[in-house]
Amino acid sequence: MIKRITADTKKRLGERVRALGEAAPLLTAWFAANRRSFPWREGRTPYGVLVSETMLQQTRIEAVLKYFDRFMAAFPTIRTLAEATDDLVMKHWEGLGYYSRARNLKKCAEICTERFDGELPETFAELIKLPGLGPYSAGAVASLCHDEPVPAVDGNVLRVLARFFGDGRDVRLPEVRKEAEDVIREVLEGGQVSPSLFNEALMELGETLCAPKGKPRCEACPFRDSCLAHAEGREEELPYRSAGAARAVEEKTVWIFMCGGKVALEKRPESGMLRGLYGFPMTEGTVPDADAADAALREKGITPLSIHPCGRAKHVFTHREWHMTGYLAETEKPVPGLLYVSMPDLANEYALPSAFRYFRNELNIDN
């Protein structure tokens, strides 16, 4: 069913386009004076923007800074990323989480190498067709690198606009995001402001002054005289974001098998959580103590020479939590079906997902 735009909605959109357009010069002037320096901004390239924006999804800038240069040094071009092995790409992504982003980035590189001579296409319409590029990523590359008048709306931008317009609607709703994109698109198509400058300035404002936690720094904000939330004293109430569904909790037991100075890894299935990645073997449920762990292993035909508890850890995914109990077991023979690697190889060659970080630290492999 086609959803018709009502007269009231059309009027609201028009008013918001005018208000944001009038405030745009203040925003871009503020950004020019306060622009932060990041590796992906200096000597900007479409590939660098794509890598940075992919890393920045659901990850803080401070964390990405540790990984961006390393990743770009290993894969300086789209072609080198396309030709790299999956395991090498995952190793250079290790610690960032959300490994599907790295897989999609590699698929994107392969397509660009095959179809576009190792370059990213320039238009939003072509970029949006690539694996892993949604409206935000495609909009960021097209606008920041080619000045195409298209929006790049992420959570930071939604927060800024919710406060600027005093909009109490749920920012999780698709229609709220769609309206934000429509308003920005009309402002950019008006030709009064650079799409690259405006989009990046909105992102910067949301990451710095109009931040999600704590009190916004309204006194330094270029929008302070035109922001409805500020005028009404509602800065800390907005945006409204409904609670997501409760995460499912799953109990797991993590087994760290050692044999001959090597540790066992298991490659996870090509479907499900952490698909295709190496990790420590796991079983469902919680084994309560070392005696029960010893018995559980012997039932599977594994005879431990020694077994020790190595703590509990929790890892939070988007829609579920793993509550993990770990045991370190020394065995005389390797456990069949597992890959045994040396400690240096585990540190340098294999990407171990952050879900296992606590138990990896128990091994002290980086010292």
Image (tube, rainbow, N blue to C red):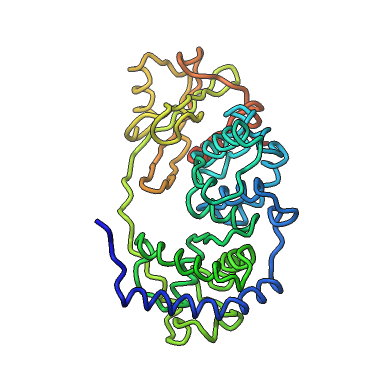
Along the line of sight, the residue nearer the viewer: 264 or 69: 69
Q: Residue at x 49, y 82 (%)?
A: 227
Q: Position of residue 347 (x, y in %)?
A: 63, 32
Q: Residue at x 36, y 17 (%)?
A: 298
Q: Quadrant of residue 61?
A: bottom right
Along the line of sight, the residue nearer the viewer: 8 or 39: 8
Task: Say whether residue 293 is left or right of residue 91.
Answer: left
Along the line of sight, the residue nearer the viewer: 285 or 33: 33
Q: The N terminus is located in which quarter?
A: bottom left
Q: In the rendered image of this protein, does residue 264 appear above or below residue 177?
A: above
Q: Position of residue 7 (x, y in %)?
A: 31, 76
Q: Residue at x 57, y 68 (%)?
A: 202
Q: The C terminus is located in which quarter?
A: top right
Tell how many labels: 0
Along the line of sight, the residue nearer the viewer: 179 or 213: 179
Residue 329 appears in the rendering: yes
Q: Position of residue 66 (x, y in %)?
A: 66, 49
Task: Say whether residue 173 is left or right of residue 54.
Answer: left
Q: Quadrant of residue 4?
A: bottom left
Return the residue found at the far left: 1
Q: Position of residue 262 (x, y in %)?
A: 58, 21
Residue 364 appears in the rendering: no
Q: In the rendered image of this protein, does residue 307 appear above or below residue 111?
A: above
Q: In the rendered image of this protein, does residue 19 appear above or below residue 103?
A: below
Q: In the rendered image of this protein, does residue 72 appear above or below residue 42?
A: above
